[in-house]
Image (spheres, rainbow, N blue to C red):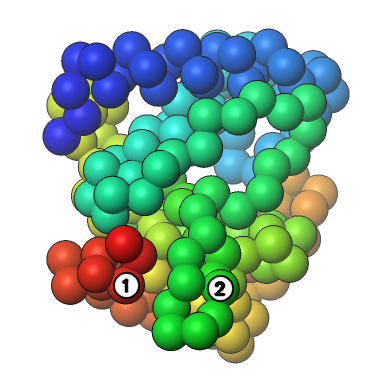
């Protein structure tokens, strides 16, 4: 669970991120239904909550930067001698398939997927998938006029506490 202090931090950063974006960028993200969702900064709250929970779980620092458009991967780790970029994807819909934009595949190697229960501010990690699994098992679909990979959660590798040792 996220604490009240965590929630206030998340909301403050999300508000700044939302205000930094041009309105035309706010209204084009895959999976967001209406301008109301984007005007409130909900997508930033949801995304940052997943990143923040992952940070608490792994001990890796979360990214609190504010940019005008787009971002880089959420976390960078070294596994063996190789650097890996991690992107945390968060959904508000329980058991929903993971959506990944092709441009995200270019910036990250590993995708961690989680569900946020906003009533309890509780994050459940479903699992992780690498770029190869997403392109091999994900189905390309047009969503809101954008090509998107849709990966059923059954293809995710379970996220286990033991994985945290690789990210520290």
The furthest residue to the front: 81
Q: Which residue is mark 1?
A: 166
Q: Secondary structure at mark 1?
A: helix
Q: Quadrant of the C terminus?
A: bottom left
- Is there CB contact under 8 Å for labels 1 and 2? no
Left or right, residue 13 beside residue 155: right
Quick one: label 2, few (<14), some, or many (20+) residues within 10 Å? few
Left or right, residue 135 beside residue 79: right
Q: Quadrant of the N terminus?
A: top left
Q: Which mark is residue 5?
A: none
In the displayed structure, 155 sits above or below 5; it is below
Left or right, residue 77 beside residue 166: right
In the displayed structure, 105 sits above or below 99; it is below
Q: Secondary structure at mark 2?
A: strand
Residue in front for this viewpoint, 19 or 38 = 19
Residue 111 appears anywhere in the view: no
Q: Position of residue 13 (x, y in %)?
A: 50, 19
Q: Position of residue 22 (x, y in %)?
A: 82, 19
Q: Earlier in the sequence, mark 1 or mark 2?
A: 2
In the displayed structure, 168 sits above or below 49; it is below
Q: Which residue is mark 2?
A: 83
Residue 56 appears anywhere in the view: yes
Q: Residue at x 78, y 53 (%)?
A: 146
Res 18 → quadrant: top right
In the displayed structure, 5 sits above or below 133; it is above
Q: Residue at x 52, y 20 (%)?
A: 14
Left or right, residue 153 beside residue 17: left
Res 164 → quadrant: bottom left
Q: Position of residue 152 (x, y in %)?
A: 43, 70
Q: Position of residue 113 (x, y in %)?
A: 39, 58
Q: Residue at x 40, y 43 (%)?
A: 61
């Amino acid at each position: 669970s996220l604490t009240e202090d965590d929630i206030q931090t998340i909301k403050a950063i999300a508000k700044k991120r939302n205000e930094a974006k041009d309105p035309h960028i706010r209204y084009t993200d895959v999976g967001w239904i209406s301008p109301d969702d984007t005007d409130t900064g909900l997508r930033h709250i949801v995304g940052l909550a997943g990143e923040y929970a992952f940070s608490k779980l792994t001990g890796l620092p979360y990214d609190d930067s504010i940019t005008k458009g787009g971002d880089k991967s959420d976390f960078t780790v070294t596994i063996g001698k190789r650097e890996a970029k991690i992107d945390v994807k968060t959904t508000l819909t329980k058991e929903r398939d993971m959506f990944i934009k092709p441009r995200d595949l270019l910036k990250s190697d590993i995708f961690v997927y989680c569900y946020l229960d906003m009533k309890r501010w509780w994050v459940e990690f479903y699992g992780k998938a690498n770029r190869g699994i997403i392109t091999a098992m994900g189905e390309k679909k047009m969503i809101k006029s954008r090509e998107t990979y849709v990966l059923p959660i059954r293809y995710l590798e379970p996220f286990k506490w033991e994985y945290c040792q690789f990210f520290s």
